Image (cartoon, helix red, strand yellow):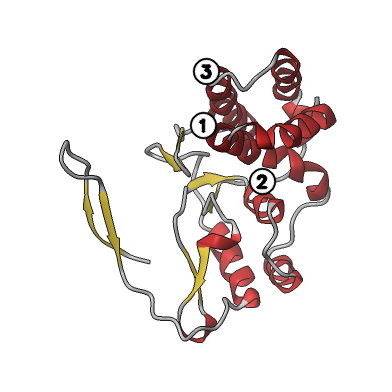
Amino acid sequence: PAVVFTCEATITQPAIVLSEWIDSDGRAPDPVRLGEQLAALHRCTAPAYGLDHDNFIGGTPQHNGWMQDWITFFRERRLWPQIELAERQRLLPAHRRQALERVVSRLEKGLGGVPRCPSLIHGDLWSGNVIAAARGTPVLIDPAISYSDREAELAFTELFGGFSSRFYAAYQAAWPLEPGYTERRDLYNLYHLLNHLNLFGEGYGAQVDAIARRYG
């Protein structure tokens, strides 16, 4: 939706973002159109990874300073800030910290050797952030945008479910993913699981630990 008004927070009032009203006729978002439109979004590219300003992923600050190398960006702008936040919140027992450090040191092994470009991604694409306008036209809300590897976006859609096989088939038909995506998928989702650990607590610790063991 287009943003029509914004107002920064003051001492007496919260920040406000007012967006256009989306009319819906009650239909669910069309999964084929969603897959096609997401692939089209990802074809919007930039010369580097990141964004010209920081933003938020949920309630957590998301750092976006430009970088030329994707793996360096994912390490320095995605994983390390979440790890350091978890440390400050006392959510990193020694075994978890050590395992995550091993993952970070081995990112080249897990993510290297793949053709990629900086794609514009929504950044927080779970099913609750997809609504439908009239005739089931998909509309994305509550973004955490950046120019990133598009695989990170597709990986997150699989983390909590809610997207149909028709959505994935339509995306693949429009722009096939590179071979080996399923081997990289959980590594990308470590970012979101760390964010959920920081936002909601130890209930996500076991998933973080499982991925850290796999890739560390």
Answer whether residue 112 is visible to the viewer in this image.
no
Circles 2 and 1: CB atoms closer than 8 Å: no
Residue 103, by quadrant, is top right
Q: Secondary structure at mark 1?
A: loop
User: For mark 2, does the 10 Å Cα neighbourhood hold few (<14), some (14 to 19), or many (20 or more) residues?
Assistant: few
Q: Residue at x 45, y 61 (%)?
A: 141
Task: Identify residue type, mark 2.
Answer: Arg
Q: Earlier in the sequence, mark 2 or mark 1?
A: 1
> Between 126 and 107, which is closer to the camera in this rendering?
126
> Between 66 and 106, which is closer to the camera in this rendering?
106
> Between 128 and 191, which is closer to the camera in this rendering?
128
Answer whether residue 85 is visible to the viewer in this image.
yes
Task: Identify residue type, mark 1.
Answer: Met
Circles 3 and 2: CB atoms closer than 8 Å: no
Q: Which quarter of the figure is the C terminus placed in?
A: top right
Q: Nearer the viewer, mark 3 or mark 1?
A: 3
Residue extending farthest to the left is 12
Residue marked by disc 1: 67
Circles 3 and 1: CB atoms closer than 8 Å: no
Q: Nearer the viewer, mark 3 or mark 2?
A: 3
User: For mark 3, does the 10 Å Cα neighbourhood hold few (<14), some (14 to 19), or many (20 or more) residues?
Assistant: few
Instruction: Give the side of residue 89 with respect to residue 141, left or right.
Output: right
Residue 147 place in picture, x, y as percent: 51, 46
Residue marked by disc 3: 88
Residue 6 place in picture, x, y as percent: 23, 53
Residue marked by disc 2: 116
Q: Residue at x 62, y 33 (%)?
A: 194
- The alpha-carbon separation of the residues under discs 3 and 2 comes to 33 Å
Q: Secondary structure at mark 2?
A: loop
Task: Identify residue type, mark 3.
Answer: Arg
Q: Which quarter of the figure is the N terminus placed in?
A: bottom left
Q: Secondary structure at mark 3?
A: helix
